[in-house]
Image (tube, rainbow, N blue to C red):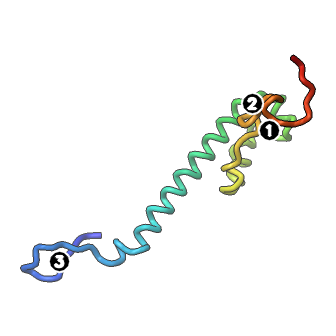
Amino acid sequence: MRPFSHKQDDLTVSMPDSATGTGFRDIIRNWMLTAIREWRRRKLTASLQSLNDRQLQDMGVYRDDIRRLVDQFDDRELGIVPVVAGRRDASQAGGNFPNTA
């Protein structure tokens, strides 16, 4: 989009309405969402690639299928935090765990 002036002698420069309206914001928003989505895909792919073949086999995933599998996930699935990252020990969990100490 090129800025334009309404009058020859007018020194103010304005952008067309389509560049400053919701269309421009939608473009930036979609670009950001796509960048975040691709970052999450790469992160999940790297996490799965770091597992050994036995762990992948336990999940029913072959190493060659990781990229195809991750590409099928939607935004909600890509945003899920692994259970291991949120693991707490028994004293913090508040459950009925035997005290081993």
Locate residue 43: give its quadrant. Answer: top right
The answer to the question of whether label 2 and label 3 lie on touching residues, with beta carbons closer than 8 A, is no
Task: From the viewer's side, name the closer residue of 30 and 90.
Answer: 90
Distance from disc 2 to disc 3, alpha carbons, whole Å, reads 59 Å
Residue 6 is left or right of residue 69, and the answer is left
Locate residue 97: give its quadrant. Answer: top right
Seen at 38% across and 75% down, the residue is 21
Q: Residues within 10 Å of mark 1 (few under 14, many from 20)?
A: some
Secondary element at tag 1: loop
Residue 76 is left or right of residue 29, and the answer is right
**Residue pointed to by mark 3:** 5
**Residue pointed to by mark 1:** 62
Q: Which label lies toward us, 1 or 2? A: 2
Seen at 43% across and 67% down, the residue is 25
Could you tell which of marks 3 and 1 lies nearer the N-terminus? 3
Seen at 34% across and 72% down, the residue is 19
Q: Amino acid at mark 3?
A: Ser
Q: Position of residue 17 (x, y in %)?
A: 33, 78
Secondary element at tag 2: loop
Could you tell which of marks 2 and 3 lies nearer the N-terminus? 3
**Residue pointed to by mark 2:** 51
Q: How many marks?
A: 3
Seen at 61% across and 46% down, the residue is 40
Could you tell which of marks 1 and 2 lies nearer the N-terminus? 2
Q: Residues within 10 Å of mark 3 (few under 14, many from 20)?
A: few
Task: From the viewer's side, name the closer residue of 33 and 92.
Answer: 92
Classify 6 as above or below 85: below
Q: Position of residue 18 (x, y in %)?
A: 36, 76
Quadrant where the N terminus lies?
bottom left
Secondary element at tag 3: loop
Q: Amino acid at mark 2?
A: Leu
